[in-house]
């Protein structure tokens, strides 16, 4: 069975600093995807970034990048130049390529201060 | 492009009452998911539809929860009768195909008293 582990319940960062949110995964599938979502206090899950297990390069989307280390089964999210609006809950998730539902971790609360 | 729509946004009911949630996915998205998110946890799948057929309902408590997606577009999730432990956020998501990126609606926050 697939599993996502996020070991940081909360992270604190100053504006304009970079922050890394940790995610490790466990899967027996050869082909799978890794996702990060942001959930502000309003409750909506906002898709941030995706990494496929066969992608050779780390995914990037604007200020978000995914540090994918396949051998260590980690998929950490890096947010560069943090902004106050980045304060939210962040979830790492995985799904196999066959399209089963996402398996989420417990999330990390990020607080950005000025 | 309009996002995933859900209603109502908030609902308060007493235990043993029934409640229904509605979801309208992004236009053209064939796959629709209902997730339950209990406070402090990540979302967990309740049911997945591909068009109007059920792909996975293994985690749906079928003695009290039901869902349908008539005509393969919008969907309704029902709880009857509700229990205290059903208090959660119910999230609907859709994807353009089985395995595509899932896009979520704003969710319905349910409180069962």
Image: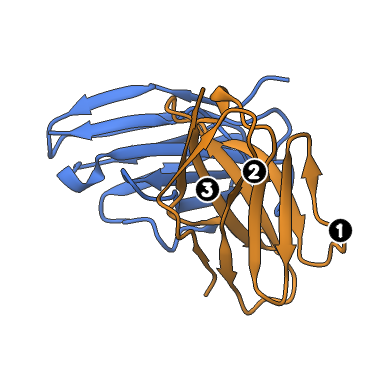
Chain colours: A orange, B blue
Report the residue at 73% width, 71% height from top: A70
Residue B54 appears in the rendering: no
Regarding mark 2 in the picture, which secondary structure is present there? Answer: loop
Q: Chain of mark 2?
A: B
Regarding mark 3 in the picture, which secondary structure is present there? Answer: strand
Q: Chain of mark 3?
A: A
For residue B49, above or below residue A14? below
For disc 2, the marked residue is: B102
For disc 1, the marked residue is: A57
Regarding mark 1 in the picture, which secondary structure is present there? Answer: loop
Q: Quadrant of residue A42?
A: top left
Horizontal side of B29 relative to B21 (left or right) equals right
Report the residue at 80% width, 45% height from top: A60
- Closer to viewer: mark 1 or mark 2: 1
Q: Position of residue B1 (x, y in %)?
A: 73, 20
Report the residue at 38% width, 29% height from top: B108
For disc 3, the marked residue is: A91
């Amino acid at each position: 069975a697939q599993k996502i582990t996020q070991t940081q319940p909360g992270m604190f960062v100053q504006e304009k600093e970079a922050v890394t949110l940790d995610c490790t995964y466990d899967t027996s599938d050869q082909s799978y995807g890794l996702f990060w979502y942001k959930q502000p206090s309003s409750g909506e899950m906002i898709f941030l970034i995706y990494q496929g297990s066969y992608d050779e390069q780390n995914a990037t989307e604007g200020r978000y990048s995914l540090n994918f280390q396949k051998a260590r089964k980690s998929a950490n999210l890096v947010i560069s130049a943090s902004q106050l609006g980045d304060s939210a809950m962040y979830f790492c998730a995985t799904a196999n390529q066959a399209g089963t539902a996402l398996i989420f971790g417990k999330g990390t609360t990020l607080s950005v201060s000025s | 492009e309009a996002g995933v729509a859900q209603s109502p946004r908030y609902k308060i009911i007493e235990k043993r009452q029934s409640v229904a949630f509605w979801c309208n996915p992004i236009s053209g998205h064939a796959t629709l998911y209902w997730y339950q998110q209990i406070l402090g946890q990540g979302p967990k799948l309740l049911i997945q539809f591909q068009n109007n057929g059920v792909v996975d309902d293994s985690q749906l408590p079928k003695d009290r929860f039901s869902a349908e997606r008539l005509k393969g577009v919008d969907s309704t999730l029902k709880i009857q009768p509700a229990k205290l432990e059903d208090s959660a956020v119910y999230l609907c998501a859709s994807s353009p195909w089985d395995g595509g990126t899932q896009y979520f609606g704003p969710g319905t926050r349910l409180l069962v008293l």
